[in-house]
Image: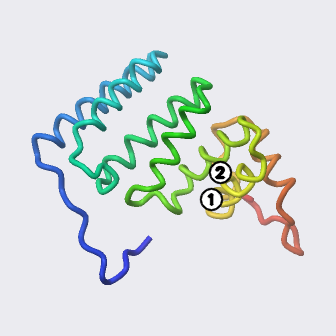
């Protein structure tokens, strides 16, 4: 999404901080892939703690909070996933990101917040079509398609 003309250029993390954040994030990724979600989330949280305040000013906070939310979602820790993803929405580049909206919708669905789930899943679906749902349980795509009115000629291929 283009930045307004008056928006300042994103600030860069100091090289040493960026290197440590990246290393911790990579180790978190490895742990999550090994099925050690809790340990992976701990590595991500440690990386998040290295960011200067306010944390929400950094693009690194966006992706760290999203991977925290994603790992918690996959581990079925939905409340923790929701908290991380909602915090991510306060960070640069989050609003309008189809993946973040997808995960927010799925988490809200699992928590029984169907109105919020429909809103978030619609945002992902209308930007990316059904392709964004391909890795996940088909119930999410079926849910959002049941909530949206199709165009007069029906959904185009890929939607």
Q: Which mark is residue 71?
A: none
As displayed, is residue 102 above or below residue 154? above
Q: CA distance from mark 1 to mark 2?
A: 6 Å
Nearest to the observer: residue 116 or residue 24:
116
Q: Could you say which quadrant of the image residue 9 lies in?
A: bottom left
Disc 1 residue crowd, few under 14, some 14–19, many 20+, Cα 10 Å: some
Mark 2 lies on residue: 131
Is residue 24 left or right of 150 when viewed as pictured?
left
Q: Is disc 1 placed on a helix, strand or loop?
A: helix
Residue at the image position 25 percent from the left and 64 percent from the top: 10
Nearest to the observer: residue 53 or residue 129:
53
Say whether marks 1 and 2 touch (CB < 8 Å): yes
Is residue 124 left or right of 109 when viewed as pictured?
left
Residue at the image position 48 percent from the left and 54 percent from the top: 89
Q: Could you say which quadrant of the image residue 29 lies in?
A: top left
Mark 1 lies on residue: 128
State the count of labels. 2
Q: Residue furthest bottom?
A: 5
Q: Position of residue 94 (x, y in %)?
A: 46, 57
Residue at the image position 66 percent from the left and 54 percent from the top: 120
Q: Position of residue 58 (x, y in %)?
A: 29, 53
Quadrant location, the N terminus? bottom left
């Amino acid at each position: 999404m283009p930045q307004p003309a008056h928006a300042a250029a994103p600030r860069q993390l100091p090289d040493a901080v960026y290197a440590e954040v990246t290393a911790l994030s990579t180790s978190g990724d490895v742990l999550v892939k090994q099925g050690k979600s809790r340990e992976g989330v701990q590595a991500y949280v440690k990386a998040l703690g290295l960011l200067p305040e306010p944390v929400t000013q950094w693009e690194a906070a966006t992706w760290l909070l999203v991977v925290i939310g994603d790992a918690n979602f996959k581990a079925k820790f939905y409340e923790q996933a929701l908290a991380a993803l909602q915090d991510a929405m306060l960070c640069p580049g989050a609003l309008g990101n189809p993946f973040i909206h997808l995960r927010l919708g799925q988490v809200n669905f699992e928590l029984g917040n169907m109105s919020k789930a429909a809103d978030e899943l619609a945002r992902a679906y209308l930007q990316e079509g059904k392709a964004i749902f391909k890795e996940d349980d088909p119930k999410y795509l079926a849910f959002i398609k049941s909530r949206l009115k199709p165009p007069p000629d029906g959904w185009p291929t890929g939607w």
